[in-house]
Image (cartoon, rainbow, N blue to C red):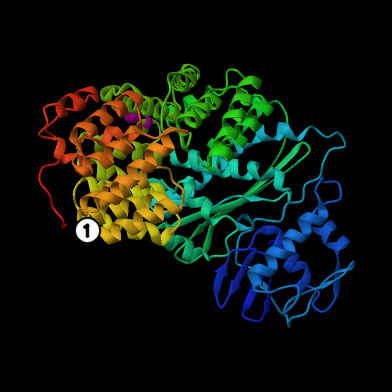
């Protein structure tokens, strides 16, 4: 007997339609992104319009009674997100009415349409319904399930993408996975899963599949933007979205792959696992991947999977927290990330990824203008230890390359490290960015630098630092109109990003637009991005003939240096603008001794052109291990 087709239930209200089977909400025919729990609340309410649905009913329906969740907080969050998406409010409700201490009522007019569904059950991401065993295992152990689950979803998503567009290269964005627990303290878990998923997909076959980086993808967390809008902004053909819910000894992950062009679900599935022997579980999942996709893993990935070692649950949890804080990029969060990675290492001294994260955090420390020997030694030791334990971690090579450039000035070794990082993870925008901006550009290899920066931008289109420093790259190439254009594009993303104001000011300065330059440097200063904008302001004053104002800037820098570190590079910037070449060279010598990063751009920085004829200038380049001759020659203000 043929199976009965499932009934597709669609609820219409106002300009909206909610499809109970596919989990889609549309407004005026366009799909609106709504997270799973708020959508379930919506369906529960529109099924009984005009009737009160109690909080207890909603709790039982959305979260089984034996799952440990903060019901009140989770339900309140779901209701809030639902109202935000519908453009509703508790005070002036058009759709959802709150009845104090009782529940909620849908007050809009609802029309239900039922028809046999033409969609496969496989394409439905059903609401999770997790049932726990009587004996609960600590939540910390659940993080171990993430690793094999990531491999499963990544491989299946890649297979569908390969089938959907044979030949050529497709672009995919992994949207932030939803924290279905409703517990804000578990946010790092869903964020960590998102980042691991991006990494796993990016490594599969970079020449066929480009994956948008975390920096850009995470800007769509809790977004209400439509699928086609996100796709257009990121330049992708596909979106992968989903959620994770852990409870006791169970973990459920849902994922769905959406084609942007027509907002259709190409593939969807859910995974529910019990915690057992981790190694046996990894083997079982790896075999299931092979059975489902009927494809062989590449030798490198197969080797990686087969050599995977068990990780202490608390170590992995601390590692995820470290990544979570590192990605916030504030001074406080990076200090916390260092502590988290150190805690992870203490729990599992053979966990390579934690050492790589520690090295990355130390070298990424913000507002640190000087690189003291003990700090560099710690970063170098951590990166070397990571590679000793697992030489396939691209992050370790990036950290070592950063040390080679800023401290050792060994360009040959830095290039080797960066190329190895790109071999291991060609889809990593940070590797392309570092190779282009920190390695190729200082040596005067301009066209190659631009190519790498553009590759980085393709993978991370909303990255502020990559966008801003593509403008800086054009600036060093003396293509000032392009630099201005790129900086203005960056400001369209975020007007509060200080470095782009500095870059734009420098481009205006080189075009002789001193008033505009001063305005941009003051904007950067107002955003508190260190002393560089102050020095840049002094340089602009000097070039525009305002010597008194430039000298006042020097006085300010000297005053600041009495109680905090001020980079000698900043003093050199003002001195060269004033034509005091002896003092400028003396300051540059101190900058080289202090290992401040900007000094590596001495060869290509046009502000120091007046020093090129000084016999001491070649010695400065020699100390930086930068040959003279491959740098820019002449000036140009056009394209």
* 238 sits to left or right of 320: left
Q: Nearer the viewer, residue 264 or 468?
A: 468
User: In the image as oriented, which residue stretches furthest toward the front?
Assistant: 548
Q: Is any atom of residue 103 visible in this view?
A: yes
Residue at image point 70% right, 62% down: 38
* 58 sits to left or right of 362: right
Q: Nearer the viewer, residue 520 or 22?
A: 520
Asked whether 308 falls inside the magenta stretch, the response is no
Label 1: how many Cα within 10 Å (few below 14, some 14–19, many 20+): some
Q: Position of residue 265 (x, y in %)?
A: 54, 60
Q: In which quarter of the image is the N terminus?
A: bottom right
Position above or below: 229 against 382: below
* 181 sits to left or right of 518: right
Residue at image point 40% right, 62% down: 492
> Magenta residues: mostly which secondary structure?
helix
Assign a secondary structure to mark 1: helix
Q: Position of residue 237 (x, y in %)?
A: 43, 58
Residue at image point 33% right, 42% down: 554
Snapshot quadrant of residue 391: top left
Snapshot quadrant of residue 445: top left
Q: Where is residue 319 in the image (x, y as percent from the top left)?
A: 60, 31
Q: In which quarter of the image is the C terminus?
A: bottom left
Q: Which of 528 and 130 is in front in this view?
A: 528
Q: Is any atom of residue 458 visible in this view?
A: no
Q: Nearer the viewer, residue 71 or 487?
A: 487
Position above or below: 342 against 120: above
> How many numbered marks are there?
1
Snapshot quadrant of residue 618: top left
Q: Where is residue 367 in the image (x, y as percent from the top left)?
A: 46, 37
Q: Give the range drawn in magenta.
A: 417-421
Find disc 1 in the rendering and name its residue.
481
């Amino acid at each position: 007997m043929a199976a009965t087709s499932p009934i597709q239930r669609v609820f219409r209200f106002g300009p909206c339609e909610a499809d109970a089977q596919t989990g889609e909400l549309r407004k005026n025919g366009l799909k609106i992104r709504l997270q799973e729990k708020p959508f379930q609340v919506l369906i529960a309410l529109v099924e009984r319009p005009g009737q009160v649905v109690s909080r207890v009913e909603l709790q039982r329906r959305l979260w089984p009674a034996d799952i440990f969740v903060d019901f009140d907080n989770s339900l309140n969050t779901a209701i809030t997100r639902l109202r935000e998406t519908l453009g509703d409010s508790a005070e002036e409700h058009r759709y959802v009415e709150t009845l104090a201490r009782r529940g909620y009522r849908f007050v809009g007019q609802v029309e239900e349409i039922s028809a046999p569904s033409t969609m496969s059950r496989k394409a439905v991401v059903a609401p999770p319904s997790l049932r726990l065993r009587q004996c609960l295992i600590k939540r910390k152990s659940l993080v171990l399930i993430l690793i094999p689950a990531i491999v499963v979803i990544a491989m299946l998503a890649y297979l569908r993408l390969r089938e959907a567009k044979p030949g050529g290269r497709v672009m995919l964005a992994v949207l932030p996975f939803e924290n279905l627990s409703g517990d804000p303290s578990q946010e790092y878990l869903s964020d960590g899963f998102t980042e691991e998923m991006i990494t796993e997909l990016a490594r599969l076959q970079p020449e066929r599949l480009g994956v948008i980086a975390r920096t850009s993808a995470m800007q769509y967390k809790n977004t209400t933007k439509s699928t086609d809008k996100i796709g257009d902004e990121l330049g992708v053909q596909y979106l992968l979205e989903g959620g994770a819910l852990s409870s006791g000894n169970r973990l459920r992950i849902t994922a769905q792959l959406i084609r942007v062009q027509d907002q259709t679900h190409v593939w969807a599935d859910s995974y529910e696992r019990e915690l057992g022997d981790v190694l046996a579980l990894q083997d079982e999942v790896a075999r299931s991947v092979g059975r489902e996709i009927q494809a062989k893993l590449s030798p490198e990935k197969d080797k990686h999977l087969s050599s995977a070692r068990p990780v202490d649950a608390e170590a992995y949890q601390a590692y995820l927290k470290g990544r979570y804080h590192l990605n916030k990029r504030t001074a406080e969060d990076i200090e916390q990330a260092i502590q988290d990675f150190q805690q992870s290492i203490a729990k599992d001294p053979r966990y390579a990824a934690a050492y790589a994260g520690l090295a990355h955090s130390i070298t990424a420390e913000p507002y640190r203008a000087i690189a003291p020997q003990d700090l560099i030694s710690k970063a170098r030791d951590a990166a070397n230890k990571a590679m000793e334990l697992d030489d396939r971690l691209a992050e370790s090579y990036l950290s070592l390359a950063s040390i080679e450039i800023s401290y050792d000035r060994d360009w040959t070794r830095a290039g080797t490290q960066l190329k190895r990082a790109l071999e291991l993870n060609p889809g990593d925008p940070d590797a392309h960015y570092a190779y282009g901006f920190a390695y190729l550009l200082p040596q005067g290899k301009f066209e190659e630098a631009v190519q790498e920066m553009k590759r980085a931008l393709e993978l991370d289109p909303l990255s502020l630092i990559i966008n801003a420093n593509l403008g800086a790259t054009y600036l060093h190439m003396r293509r000032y109109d392009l630099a201005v254009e790129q900086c203005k594009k960056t400001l369209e993303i975020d007007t509060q990003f200080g470095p782009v104001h500095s870059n734009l000011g420098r481009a205006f300065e080189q075009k002789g637009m001193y008033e505009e330059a001063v305005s941009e440097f003051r904007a950067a200063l107002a955003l508190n991005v260190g002393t560089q904008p102050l020095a840049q302001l002094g340089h602009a004053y000097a070039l525009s003939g305002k010597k008194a104002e430039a000298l006042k800037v020097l006085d300010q820098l000297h005053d600041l240096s009495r109680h905090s570190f001020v980079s000698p590079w900043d003093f050199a910037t003002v001195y060269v603008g004033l034509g005091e070449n002896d003092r400028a060279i003396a300051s540059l010598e101190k900058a080289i001794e202090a290992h401040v990063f900007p000094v590596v751009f001495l060869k290509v920085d046009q502000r120091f052109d007046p020093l090129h004829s000084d016999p001491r200038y070649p010695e400065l380049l020699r100390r930086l291990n930068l040959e003279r001759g491959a740098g820019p020659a002449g000036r140009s203000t056009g394209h």
